[in-house]
Amino acid sequence: MPYSDTLQPALPVYIVLESNALIAEDIIGSLRATGPCRVIRVERPEMLVPSLHTEPAVTAAFLEMPYRELVQSDLHQSLADSGARIILTIGEDDESVVLQQGWGMLVRPFTEQMIREALTPRRDADSH
């Protein structure tokens, strides 16, 4: 029987919205170190919307956006519709409300281990 790759699981897709190239490369490098994946990097929120229309599923989105800006946009709903785990990389003053939404917070400066941990939802976020 010939081998078919149609049953292969899809690669995880990550979005990195980050204006600083060095920080973006740190995040991307850490994500790629976890295994094969596709990473979409954008520098501004408005650049993200066209990418979401072409992606059927997004694993996680690392967003350099304050909480208030994200909830005032439609971006959080578009990301939720794609199945993305939202992880904010700025605005740690809003960490408790971010976590209440079931989202993640990656506080700067961060390590590769912190990036990996941010990909896993916190157990207490699922309890309400």
Image: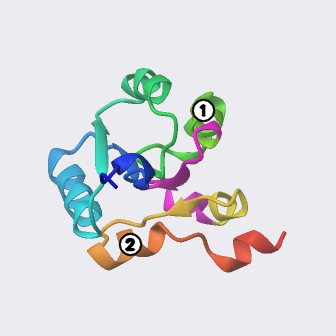
User: The residue under label 2 is which amino acid type?
Assistant: Arg
Answer whether residue 72 is visible to the viewer in this image: yes
Q: Residue at x 18, y 53 (%)?
A: 25
Q: Nearer the viewer, residue 71 or 39?
A: 39
Looking at the figure, which quarter contains the C terminus?
bottom right
Badge 1 element: helix
Answer whether residue 111 is visible to the viewer in this image: no
Magenta residues span 81-95
Above or below, 125 against 79 in this view is below
Q: Residue at x 47, y 52 (%)?
A: 60
Above or below, 63 against 123 in this view is above
Badge 2 element: helix
Left or right, residue 106 beside residue 70? left
| Picture disc at residue 15 | none
**Reading the chain from its start, which is encountered first: label 2 or label 1?**
1
Query: Can you give x and y, in whole percent of width and height, for residue 47 in the image?
Result: 36, 24
| Residue 28, image quadrant | bottom left
Residue that carries the numbered disc 1 in the rendered image: 78
